[in-house]
Image: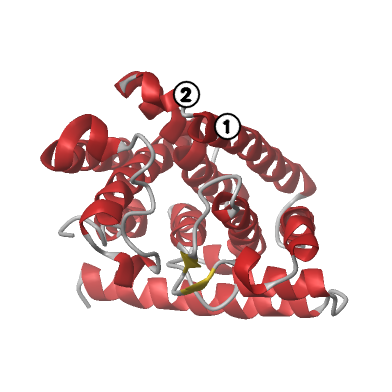
Amino acid sequence: MGADAVFAEFKARVRREVEAALEGALAACEATEVRRVAEYAALGGGHRWRAIATVAAGMTFRDDALEVCLPSACGVELAHAASLILDDLPSMDDASTRRGKPCAHLAFPRWAVDMAPPFLVSLAFQTALRNPLVSSERRIAAALEMAGAAGRMIEGQEMDVTQAAAEGSGALLECYTLKTGALYAASAKVGAILCGADETDAAVFYDSGMGLGLSYQFLDDTADQLGGGGRSGKPTGQDRRKRTALSVYGVEGARARAAAFAEQALAPLERFGPRAALFVSLVREADWARDA
């Protein structure tokens, strides 16, 4: 079986397992309106790139990484779902569609939508920390990594909302590093930590995950302007009022930067050889907007 086929099978399996585990975690909660918002935001859509990054990084160190990393992969997706609800609010991007359906604030009472993000974040940490396959020390280290990423995401979102990134290309890159790159980087590092990586190797996956996240964000900007909404689940033009990679670098410049970030993600992985093949494939695969 070729590398592409191996990765396609791996990706499909992770997505199935994550979806089933998320359904179970949410079903175990009280059947409230807030839970229904959380289910609406977290289930039945999304590429699950961040969860895949967690497991793919772990596979570098353990063959059973899917089982070992599944609780934290679900935690990553729950936290990401919380950020999407917030990102779409009228006070943020004022979006109308997410993952091919109306945004949560257009489908549920506003009070329930406001309560859903903290509910999702709380459930994310509960899910990730209930993992008997990993030592308490590594569970705590992974949870602290995710908590740090959450703080950086909030800082980046503030830059985005206040348009501090409009000051220039350096500010835009800082915004994207915090807003998008931090969660990808932490997701990869968490997978490595849970599967036994030492500090040096875990840091390598943090850097590689950061390159992956930045590449994705630059391509997402391209898709927003030029097409790709059918694959991303969002209509085009949602970012037209903001400073983005396209407004700073132009189409070809943004694509070139995305390619450079992908190379940045790949370079540190050479030290692991074939063991990192799945993460290498992830970096090369997560480019749905490249030709948009």
Q: Which three-letter amino acid code belongs to the residue tagged 1? A: Glu
Element assignment for label 1: helix
Q: Where residue 120 appears, x then y in whole percent?
A: 73, 59
The image quarter in which residue 165 lies: top left
Q: Name the residue under label 2.
A: 164
Q: Name the residue under label 1.
A: 158
Q: Disc 1 vs disc 2: Cβ atoms closer than 8 Å?
A: yes
Q: Where residue 174 appears, x then y in whole percent?
A: 43, 25
State the separation of the CA atoms marked 1 and 2: 8 Å
Q: Which of 14 and 245 is in front in this view?
A: 245
Q: Which three-letter amino acid code belongs to the residue tagged 2? A: Ala
Find the residue positioned furthest to the left.
252
Please give the name of the residue rendered at 72% of the width and 62% of the height, measured from the top-left corner: 113
User: Is 43 above or below relative to 84?
Assistant: below
User: Is 280 above or below relative to 254?
Assistant: below
Please give the name of the residue rendered at 53% of the width and 29% of the height, measured from the top-left corner: 162
- Quarter placement of the C terminus: bottom left
User: Is 201 above or below relative to 287?
Assistant: above
Q: Nearer the viewer, residue 33 or 147?
A: 33
The way the protein has been coloured in the rendering is secondary structure
Element assignment for label 2: helix
Q: Can residue 274 be seen in this view?
A: no
